[in-house]
Amino acid sequence: MTGERLYRRVDRRALAFAIGFPVALAIAFVISGLFLAGGLPHGVVLPVGGNPLPVGVYLPVGGIVVAGVGAGIGTQAARTVLPRQLRRILLGLSMTVQLALCSLFGAAMVGQTGGPGLPPQRVDLQVLATGCGAAVALGVVLAMTFKPDEQWTPADDAAFERALESDHNPQAAADRLEYWTRPRGTVITMILLCGVFPGALLSVLTPWLLLAATVAAVFVVGFLSALVGVDREGVSVKLAGVVPVITVPSTDVVAAVSLDVAARDYGGWGLRKHDGSATFLASSGAAVVLRLDGGRSLAIGAPDLDVADAAAAILNRRAGKAPQEK
């Protein structure tokens, strides 16, 4: 029984990657470092300082740090009890950190090797900046492309309970809908590239500029993505699936309709609030538009018109009714 529970709590493919990649990266670092050993007869000082270590000691130390830290973070992404988005972030962070560490240890070797007419330095900043830029970019790409395996979770338990409830009240099961609204894939790619590429160029000055540019790009994508929930209680919008920004109870709904809208007609992309009315549109296209009491309105984007039709149907059935009514 314990083994079965452990199996359900661990994504084995993600675990294999989270351990295998940093180990392979550490081995590659050690092998590559051997080519620089001839230029370091007096050993290598660790990036944090201290006495020089023989190359035969420095390389295993660097490899152990890269593999240990990378696997330590990455294995957390294999825990199926964690939210899917958090698992994506952890795996992307693991990729970024282990590649950055590999770049740091490599930059120390290159810097202390020096060159003709160049004084040795503890860390070669150009090598470090280039490596960290690639590390951040690959981490973002991995986080965006990683698809956690579907596992049985508490959310599935809740869905199972709703299915049982629907045997006695079929309409109750139909009055629930949850979906993501986010920009088109090309828009997400453009935003990330606009953040990562300039940041990579500016990282020659300082790696912090690359980190800031990447964080800003990810923030913009998160600001344009939301989890929309429609049920017998009303409608809610959670920014990036976490921060609730719109909550409207069913008693405030007068009517709802699905439309094909242009974002510019509602003030643009993202969250907009004005005079009690609100909109959240990740792009132009399908949306569910609500008329609320007091002359207010609400427009929320949807992946397609079929989803918008389903959301509008639920809201029209529950319009003006108290949330506790079943």
Image: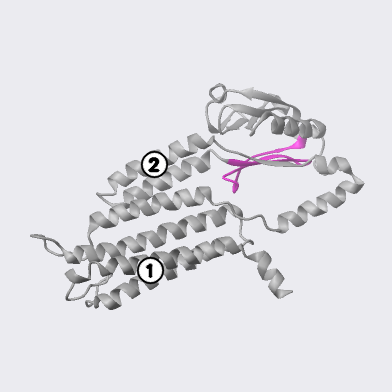
Does the rendering let one see residue 252? yes
Image position, residue 105 (x, y; %): 30, 66
Between 187 and 146, the one lying in front of the other is: 146
Disc number lying in front (2 or 1): 1
- Marks 2 and 1, how far apart in space? 32 Å
Task: Inspect the magenta stretch and tell me whether residue 198 lies in it.
Answer: no
Between 304 and 317, the one lying in front of the other is: 304
* Residue at figure coordinates x 57%, y 23% from the top left: 262
Between 242 and 155, the one lying in front of the other is: 155
Instruction: Identify the mark at residue 245; answer none if there is no mark.
Output: none
Image position, residue 201 (x, y; %): 29, 44
Bounds of the magenta segment = 226-251
Residue 93, relative to residue 167: is it above or below? below
Q: Quadrant of the N terminus?
A: bottom right
Residue at image mark 1: 27
Q: Quadrant of the C terminus?
A: top right
* Residue at figure coordinates x 22%, y 76% from the top left: 52
Left or right: 47 as drawn, with respect to 91: left
Amino acid beneath label 1: Ile
Amino acid beneath label 2: Gly
Question: Where, by quadrant of the figure, is residue 298 drawn?
Answer: top right
Type of colouring: one colour
Image position, residue 12 (x, y; %): 60, 64
* Residue at figure coordinates x 80%, y 40% from the top left: 175
* Residue at figure coordinates x 36%, y 51% from the top left: 134
Q: Secondary structure at mark 2?
A: helix
Instruction: Identify the mark at residue 195; answer none if there is no mark.
Output: 2
* N-term-proximal mark, 2 vs 1: 1
Left or right: 125 as drawn, with respect to 98: left
Does the rendering let one see residue 79? no
